[in-house]
Image: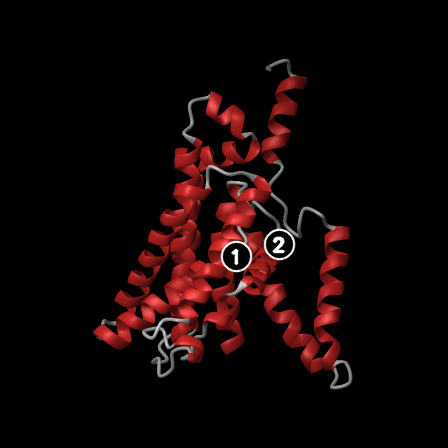
């Protein structure tokens, strides 16, 4: 049941990054930072102010969204590799700040967090995230996200304020990631800044790429596989247990060669419709 709960939390993280990288086309290498900010904020609200669990995780998600806005305003004018480097730097700065604050427990982390998260709470959060994201993507805002991903210059020429919409995508993605962070903290009862470092961000990015960028259910599938695979390799044989991460990486490489667009790539219906129109002379 704990592994299933972790799968659901990772699915929320993958779906949140998929909004930023899959739908909006912005490469972020510091997504775990928003998870960590949500986890620490939710924990501190509960431990210091005795706020109820649901209030704490929502407030933690709001704090993460606020920092999504803070980092988004100066960095989302950048593109490509420059944006990736900026988000990576933001993640490392935040981790070191958390390591040196007394209120966060410093390098010892925070302990004594009540265990409230269970599979039902996590599942309810995932349903909320998928439903709300589906409504966003099918709205004018979501179409603007996709337009920016496809061709940012063309989107600007059509009157879309690309910077504003990229910041909005960062805020929403950070909110979802902060929500996942709060669930994570109240599941394991202990958090440490090192839990939300660069490698965690890369793991979340792998979930999105493996499942299929630009596909919400693909992100959920990628999170499921990447969460289960190390556990499966751990239990296959004690002899190969020490090599499970090597096998894990090898399987990922093979999958990327066989299915470069991910297991469930973005729907090609949008690509088929123009072709049919051309064949009928409707273009």
Q: Is residue 210 above or below residue 77?
A: below
Residue tagged 2: 211
Q: Secondary structure at mark 2?
A: helix
| Closer to the eye: label 2 or 1 | 1
Q: Residue at x 65, y 18 (%)?
A: 278
Q: Earlier in the sequence, mark 2 or mark 1?
A: 1
Q: Is residue 62 above or below residue 53?
A: above
Residue 151, position in %: x, y? 56, 29
Residue tagged 1: 14
Dividing the picture into quarters, in which one does residue 211 lie? bottom right
Q: Residue at x 39, y 36 (%)?
A: 164
Residue 203, position in %: x, y? 59, 62
Residue 32, position in %: x, y? 49, 61
On screen, residue 130 versus residue 59, left or right, reads: right
Residue 113, position in %: x, y? 35, 80
Dividing the picture into quarters, in which one does residue 250 lie? bottom right
- Closer to the camera in the image, 193 or 144: 193
Q: Separation of disc 2 and disc 1 at Cα?
A: 9 Å
The C terminus lies in quadrant: top right
Q: Secondary structure at mark 1?
A: helix
Q: Residue at x 71, y 68 (%)?
A: 248
Q: Is residue 42 above or below residue 147?
A: below
- Closer to the camera in the image, 258 or 283: 258
How are the residues colored? Answer: secondary structure
């Amino acid at each position: 049941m704990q592994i299933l709960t972790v799968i659901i939390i990772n699915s929320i993280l993958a779906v949140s990054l998929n909004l930023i990288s899959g739908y909006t086309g912005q490469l972020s290498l510091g997504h775990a930072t928003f998870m960590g900010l949500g986890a620490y904020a939710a924990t501190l609200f509960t431990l210091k102010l005795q706020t109820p669990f649901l209030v704490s995780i929502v407030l933690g998600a709001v704090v993460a969204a606020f920092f999504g806005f803070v980092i988004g305003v100066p960095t989302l004018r950048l593109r490509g590799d420059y944006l990736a480097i900026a988000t990576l730097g933001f993640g490392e700065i935040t981790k070191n700040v958390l390591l040196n604050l007394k209120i966060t427990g410093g390098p010892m982390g925070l302990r004594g967090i009540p265990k409230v998260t269970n599979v039902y709470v996590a599942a309810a959060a995932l349903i909320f995230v998928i439903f709300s994201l589906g409504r966003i993507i099918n709205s004018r805002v979501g179409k603007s996200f996709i337009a920016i991903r496809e061709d940012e210059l063309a989107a600007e020429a059509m009157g879309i304020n690309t910077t504003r919409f990229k910041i909005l995508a960062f805020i929403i993605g950070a909110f979802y990631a902060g929500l996942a962070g709060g669930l994570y903290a109240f599941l394991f009862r202990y958090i440490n800044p090192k839990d939300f470092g660069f490698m965690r961000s890369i793991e979340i990015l792998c979930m999105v790429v493996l499942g299929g960028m630009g596909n919400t259910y693909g992100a959920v599938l990628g999170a499921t596989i990447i969460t289960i695979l190390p556990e499966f390799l751990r239990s296959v044989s004690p002899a190969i247990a020490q090599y499970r991460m090597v096998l894990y990486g090898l399987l990922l490489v093979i999958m990327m060669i066989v299915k470069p667009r991910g297991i469930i790539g973005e729907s090609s219906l949008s690509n088929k419709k123009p072709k049919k129109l051309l064949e009928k002379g409707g273009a």
